[in-house]
Amino acid sequence: MADFSKGFTLGVLTGAVIGSLTAILVAPDKGSNTRSRVSYHIQTYIDEIRSLIDELKDENFAINTAKQESDDVVEDAKQKAEDLLREAEDLLSNISKESKN
């Protein structure tokens, strides 16, 4: 899933840059107008990149949180299983002692 997100993000950014450059080269305008449009588009792309980075950080945090919670559940289950085995061994030990008496 993370590889898909990275690839998709890279594809979107690459397409946006190529599209912008093509638009600038095909539709010439005054230099000041072109610089203004380029600045606007660059700022828009920077904002989009920051937004995507924030989303990826949130996704990574959620994954790490879920992993930690699942590790906690597994550890708790192991502890309970060990406790049950000890109890069963104690019961068997007590039954053996009582049957000898």
Image (cartoon, rainbow, N blue to C red):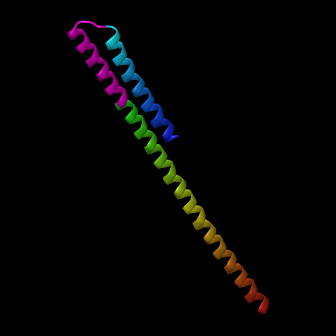
Task: Identify the main secondary structure in magenta.
Answer: helix
Left/right of residue 69 with respect to residue 91 in the rendered view: left
Q: Position of residue 33 (x, y in %)?
A: 24, 9
Residue interval drawn in magenta = 28-49
Q: Decide: is 67 above or below 13.
A: below
Q: Decide: is 11 above or below 78.
A: above
- Residue 73, by quadrant, is bottom right
Left/right of residue 22 with respect to residue 85 in the rendered view: left
Q: Position of residue 95 (x, y in %)?
A: 75, 83
Q: Position of residue 37 (x, y in %)?
A: 28, 14
Residue lying farthest to the left in this orientation: 32
- Name which residue lies at 40% across and 32% down: 52
Task: Specify whether residue 38 is painted magenta.
Answer: yes
Q: Decide: is 70 above or below 89.
A: above
- Residue 38, by quadrant, is top left
Q: Decide: is 67 above or below 28.
A: below
- Name which residue lies at 45% across and 37% down: 6
Left/right of residue 99 with respect to residue 74 in the rendered view: right
- Residue 85, by quadrant, is bottom right
Residue lying farthest to the bottom in this orientation: 101
- Name which residue lies at 46% across and 49% down: 64
Q: Nearer the viewer, residue 7 or 93?
A: 7
Residue lying farthest to the front in this orientation: 25
Q: Nearer the viewer, residue 67 or 41?
A: 41
Q: Position of residue 61 (x, y in %)?
A: 43, 44
- Name which residue lies at 34% across and 24% down: 45
Q: Quadrant of the C terminus?
A: bottom right
